[in-house]
Amino acid sequence: MAHHHPPMDFLLEYAAGALPVAQSACVAAHLSYCQRCRQLVDRLEDVGGAHLERLDPQPVGESVLESVMARLDDPEPLRYAPNEVSDTQLPGLLDRLINGNYADLAWKRVTQSLSISYLKTGDPSHEFALYRIAAGGRIPEHTHGGSEMTLVLRGGFADESGEYHPGDFLVREGWDKHTPVALEGEECICLAVLDAPLRFTRLRHRWLNPLLKLRAG
């Protein structure tokens, strides 16, 4: 059961279909853990639908109608069934991106405790990556050049603000500084969505900053 949730403005944008692809995928993954947020999004979608029904109809040109009619014969969108060999237990989009087991991904080692696997969502403005922290290991103290969404997928970690477990959702802004430490006994795997790279703050780790360029797309 998740104890940390997306802020209301993120849920509103998600329900309206206004979030960028990478951020939307992160919120959707949280919803797979959190009944509270699923119910809230359902209510927001109902409110949005009711609002649209009250709007006065607007005339459209024949070209719009022709475009809609032409798409009626399009094949159905792809539907991704759960991968029977996957160990991720995530919703279809994330499971499709990971494509199997965490161990099969290409992991880039950044520090002794931290490895990163970059995934592609087609979102040109956000990096979408998995962070793997060794049990008891830490990510060096860092700030965020922009916003960062984090969703715990496996294990857990703690920082200066609290302790987080699978399904917990965090948002960090550019001015936030923290030092995540994985809980003992199990490695921690998190999904991170960034619009600017991390910046390590301690002198002995700053030399790594040029390696942490944003990998969007």
Image (cartoon, grey):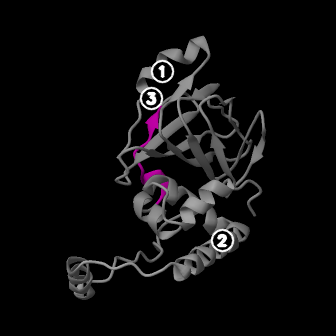
- Disc 2 to disc 1, C-alpha distance: 39 Å
Q: Secondary structure at mark 3?
A: loop
Q: Position of residue 203 (x, y in %)?
A: 59, 11
Is disc 1 in contact with disc 3, using a CB cutoff of under 8 Å? Answer: yes
Q: Residues within 10 Å of mark 3 (few under 14, many from 20)?
A: few
Q: Position of residue 35 (x, y in %)?
A: 71, 71
**Looking at the image, which is closer to me, 8 or 166?**
8
- Disc 1 to disc 3, C-alpha distance: 7 Å
Q: Position of residue 211 (x, y in %)?
A: 42, 25
Q: Which residue is mark 3?
A: 212
Viewer-nearest of discs 2 and 1: 2
Q: Residue furthest top?
A: 203
To which quarter of the image does residue 160 belong?
Answer: top right
To which quarter of the image does residue 216 belong?
Answer: top left
Q: Secondary structure at mark 1?
A: helix
Q: Position of residue 94 (x, y in %)?
A: 47, 61
Is residue 140 something one can see in this rendering?
Answer: no
Is residue 116 something one can see in this rendering?
Answer: yes
Q: Residues within 10 Å of mark 2 (few under 14, many from 20)?
A: some
**Looking at the image, which is closer to me, 60 or 23?**
60
Q: Compared with residue 202, is residue 174 higher up or lower down, i.e. above or below?
A: below
- Disc 3 to disc 2, C-alpha distance: 34 Å
Tell me the amino acid under the disc marked 2: Arg
Q: Which mark is residue 38?
A: 2
Residue range in magenta is 101-109
Q: Find out whether residue 97 is within the magenta segment.
A: no
Q: Which residue is mark 1?
A: 208
Q: Find out whether residue 105 is within the magenta segment.
A: yes
